[in-house]
Image (cartoon, helix red, strand yellow):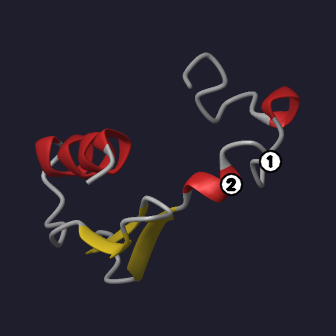
Amino acid sequence: MDPRSGAARQELVERGVDAGDVTVIDPRDGGTLFGFSDPDGNSWTVQEMKVRAGRPLIPLAARIGYGADQD
């Protein structure tokens, strides 16, 4: 399991969110996912893929307020 997926899940659990287990999609890619529901009952899935590390969906320069100071 990628340590970042585990850390993201742990952060949610520490905040009282009931998050599912991290599932490895493809160990060659490092792809993982887990799901959780927010307080309003909306279901969410967090997916991580190493292929996106070089080209993130939200460019670093645009991450103001989204943990821009974190990798």
At horizontal 43% and vertical 58% (from top left) the residue drawn is 30
* Residue 15: image location, x then y, percent: 18, 44
Q: Is residue 71 above or below residue 15?
A: above
Q: Which residue is mark 2?
A: 52
Badge 2 crowding class, 10 Å Cα cut-off, few under 14, some 14 to 19, many 20 or more, is few
The type of residue carrying mark 1 is: Arg
- What residue is rendered at 68% in x and 54% in y? 52
- In which quadrant of the rendered image does the C terminus lie? top right
Q: Is the residue 34 above or below the residue 14 in the image?
A: below
Q: Farthest residue toward the front? A: 28
Specify the quadrant of the image occupied by residue 10: top left
Residue 50 drawn at (x, y percent): 57, 53
Labels 2 and 1 touching (C-beta < 8 A): yes
Closer to us: 12 or 60: 60
Q: SS of the residue at dot 1?
A: loop
The secondary structure type at the circle numbered 2 is helix
Q: Residue furthest top?
A: 69
Q: Is residue 39 above or below residue 49?
A: below
Disc 1: CA contacts within 10 A as few (<14), some (14-19) or many (>=20): few
| Residue drawn at the location 77% of the way across and 55% of the way down | 57
* Residue under pointer 1: 55
- Amino acid type of disc 2? Arg
Q: For residue 26, what is the image quadrant?
A: bottom left
Query: Is 36 placed left or right of 21 in the picture?
Result: right
Residue 24 in the image, given as x and y percentages of width and height: 30, 71
Q: Residue at x 13, y 66 (%)?
A: 18
